[in-house]
Amino acid sequence: MTTHRPLTTRSSAGRYGTTVHLDVSGAMFDDAAAEDLQFDGERLGGARFARCDLRGVEIVSSDVRGMRIDGVLVTDLLAAFFRSDR
């Protein structure tokens, strides 16, 4: 049995046009299109992305401690990158 809880939303004029404030805690998205989606100041701890097309995704000024890509800590990947000759 799948239970769905209602999503909480509110809208406001934002920096990038209309901003929708949406609580999707515990939600699961399947086959969702979200091109040009922007997150600013969001808490995504515990989120999981699987079988997603992440080409062109940019992460800036974000806390990536504990974040993993295919089981490898992003902080370890960045440390190795900066130690290399690039």
Image (cartoon, grey):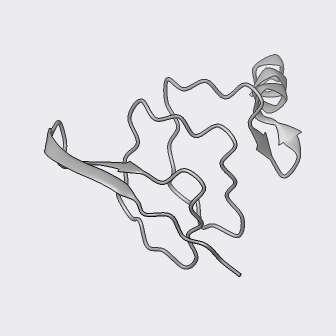
Can I make out residue 17 in this image?
no
Q: Quadrant of residue 84?
A: top right
Q: Is residue 61 left or right of residue 11?
A: right
Which residue is situated farthest in the left direction here?
13
* Residue occupying the point 43% across, 63% down: 6
Q: Does residue 2 appear to the left or right of 73 in the view shown?
A: left
15 over 34 or under it: above or below: above
Q: Nearer the viewer, residue 44 or 24?
A: 24
Q: Nearer the viewer, residue 9 or 29?
A: 9
Q: Position of residue 19 (x, y in %)?
A: 22, 46
Residue 30 percent location from the top left of the image: 58, 76
Q: Is residue 71 visible?
A: yes
Q: Residue furthest right?
A: 71
* Direction from residue 40 to residue 57 in the image, left or right: right
- From the viewer's perspective, is residue 50 above or below residue 32? above
**In percent of the image, x 50 and y 64: which residue is there?**
5
Residue nearest the observer in this picture, 22 or 18: 22
Q: Position of residue 53 (x, y in %)?
A: 59, 67
